[in-house]
Amino acid sequence: MPNAHFQLPKSAVADYERDGAVVLRGVLNAEQVARLAQGIEHNLAHLSPLAQVASKGDDPGKFVEDFCTWQSNPAYESIMRDSALPRVAKALMQSESVRIYHDHMLVKEPDTRQVTPWHQDQPYYNVSGHQNVSFWIPVDPVSVESTLRFVAGSHAGTWYMPRTFRDNQAKWFPDGALAELPTIDAEPEKFQQLAWALQPGDAVAFHMLTLHASGGVGPKQRRRVFSVRYLGDDARHALRPWRTSPPFVGLSDRLADGAVMDDLLFPVVA
């Protein structure tokens, strides 16, 4: 299934380094998109204990997420290992190695009003280091109104306080330990936003510290997305005294704080 014909645009590495996000058109071929859609439907029918409904009970739609199921989902595994993604990840991270971190399914059913608020991913995780990349890959067309939006350059270093999406609670770092999110939408002249409409097979690649958000979907839209996250050479285990999102139960017994992420959960794929 490798997408041997996909060529990374010449400007992509520099754009990623500067902005922390870049759009990739046609990174998966039609066969891979169909395979990935089958994997998402299988995931929806066999949700893991980590799955959650991220929308409120009165939402006319439904936002379902699940994590870390790739080892029991052959469609996910084939995309994560055998597509162009590891090769692209290696180039974008400017890393000698590429290690799987985890997978993340995000499905917004038609008429889901729940937005995904501005946040960074890395503060929720158990990983330090700067060489990383996430791919957000829809198998349905995604409009600009429903796509991911990014704050260009926000991956430069500041860590913002991670909070729960629905009730804005600090369940990770203690209050005051990290900077609070700025008022991004209220200051468009200060925070340059990037957003792209996407077709099946397209992807956006973004750094785990890049601020991002997304809207809901319309009554005739369904937004099925698969996200895969990779780690590069400088990634290290960041031992947390709290439950990370996603959690990796038992990992702290196998990996010391600051250790290379050398574990069966995180295989090297490039």
Image: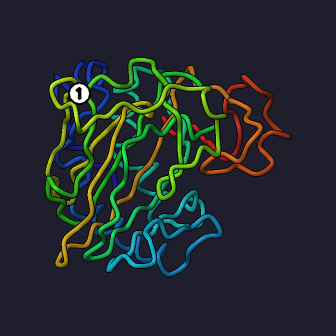
**Horizontal side of residue 175 vs 64, given as left or right:** right
- Identified at 51% across, 27% down, the residue is 232
Position of the N terminus by quadrant: bottom left
Front position in the image: 52 or 13: 52
**Horizontal side of residue 208 vs 257, given as left or right:** left
Front position in the image: 105 or 219: 219
Reply above or below: 120 against 56.
Answer: above
Reply above or below: 254 against 131.
Answer: below
Give the number of callouts: 1
Q: Which residue is the extreme one toward the right?
A: 253
Front position in the image: 60 or 255: 60
Residue that numbered label 1 is attached to: 191
Residue 248, percent from left and from top: 70, 49
Label 1, secondary structure: give it. Answer: loop
Q: In which quarter of the image is residue 170?
A: top right
Q: Quadrant of residue 178?
A: top right
Q: How crowded is mark 1: few (under 14 residues within 10 Å), some or many (20 or more)?
A: some
Residue 105, percent from left and from top: 44, 61
Residue 247, percent from left and from top: 67, 50
Give the colour scheme shown: rainbow
Front position in the image: 154 or 82: 154
Residue 231, percent from left and from top: 52, 33
Amino acid of disc 1 = Phe
Q: In which quarter of the image is residue 241?
A: top right
- Identified at 46% across, 48% down, the residue is 81
- Identified at 80% across, 29% down, the residue is 256
- Identified at 68% across, 29% down, the residue is 238
